[in-house]
Image (cartoon, helix red, strand yellow):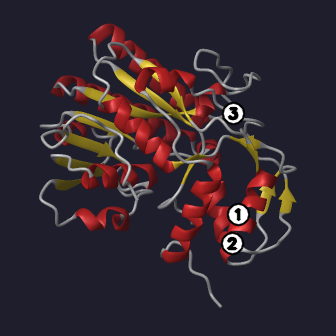
Amino acid sequence: MYDQKYHTTDISKASFLITGGAGFIGSNLVEYLMTHGAGKVRVLDNFSTGSMENIEPWFARPEFSLLEGDIRDLDTCRRAVEGIDYVLHQAALGSVPRSINDPITSNDVNVSGFLNMLVAARDAGVKRMVYAASSSTYGDHPGLPKVEDKIGNPLSPYAVTKYVNELYAQVFSRTYDFHTIGLRYFNVFGPRQNPRGPYAAVIPLFVQSALKQEAPFINGDGETSRDFTYVENAVQANIKAVLAQEIKKHEVVNIAVGESTTLNQLWKFICEHTGISLEPQYREERKGDVRHSLANVSKAQQLIGYQPAVTIQKGLQTTVEWYKQSSFIKVTS
């Protein structure tokens, strides 16, 4: 999948830690680094949402190692960063509805766990930490497209946790000269995103419905819009950000495509890619959801050289083909 190379420096002697590396975005980062000859790749994951299957292809490689553990434990974080040059922090409990149903656990993982990683990485002399921020931080700010310095009030406990991450990272930069980069992801999708469970994201759910030829549920009227971002774009951003040594303070950048797609359009696209025709079922809007989301990615372009390489249509085509071949969706005839 990762034929495209997004770095120019030699990483054959560099060591990387990917927290949440058995998850969706994390395992794609592992694949990129293993494919392109990283010196050492270590995964830290507690497998609460990640899957052993996602990283199994690399188990036999000597440069790969797995530490099963939880970022809520500081000692585990300290062990994870031993001998590590670069940290790609993806571990978190996602989902707005999950955070509404259980704000305490979301806070424990996303805030306390994040702080543990900051402390461990700082104390270990890690060269750079890049972390998964979120477009949910924009909250109720009405402006479109979203620009990094204009945010509103958070609309969910999840959004609060991701904003607190940015505040902690900023404080660590000013107080300890430990400079990190936050990537505000906009609705990332692609291979290895799990369609199962109560908190699955919309694209894997829609693809699952299409492949099973079942009408999906759409929350609201279907005119809610998102800047859907194929996972390869997120991988590119992580690699470019983590190796951007010239950045000398905390930064936050949008990672998206810069295109708006409604849920109705999304379902139509997926129908086209799967060759079906079904009308969706509409139901009440979810609490905490933002109505529209669209990113301005110019800061990421200027700061780390980010260029969204995969459009939503190309990404959907690749994603649908992957799900057809995977064990994530079982289609009965």
In the image, 250: left or right of 119?
Answer: right
Q: CA distance from mark 3 to mark 2?
A: 26 Å
Q: Is residue 200 in sight in this rendering? A: no
Seen at 73% across and 36% down, the residue is 290
Q: Earlier in the sequence, mark 3 or mark 2?
A: 2
- Give the position of the C terminus as an image quadrant: bottom right
Residue closest to the far bottom = 333
Q: Is residue 211 above or below residue 251?
A: below
Return the residue at label 2: 274
Q: Nearer the viewer, residue 176 or 213?
A: 213
Residue type indicated by callout 2: Thr
At which x and y percent is residue 198?
Answer: 62, 60
Q: Quadrant location of residue 68?
A: bottom left
At which x and y percent is residue 283?
Answer: 85, 56
Q: CA distance from mark 1 to mark 3?
A: 20 Å
Seen at 66% across and 40% down, the residue is 227
Point out the frontmost of discs 3 and 2: 2
- Give the position of the N terminus as an image quadrant: bottom left
Q: Secondary structure at mark 2?
A: helix
Determine contact: label 2, label 1, CB under 8 Å: yes
Disc 2 residue crowd, few under 14, some 14–19, many 20+, Cα 10 Å: some
At which x and y percent is residue 55?
Answer: 31, 62
Residue type indicated by callout 1: Ile
Seen at 78% across and 61% down, the residue is 268
In the image, 13: left or right of 287?
Answer: left
Return the residue at label 3: 294
Q: Secondary structure at mark 1?
A: helix
Q: Secondary structure at mark 3?
A: loop
Q: Is residue 215 above or below residue 297?
A: below
Return the residue at label 1: 270
Q: Nearer the viewer, residue 73 or 27?
A: 27
Seen at 78% across and 37% down, the residue is 291
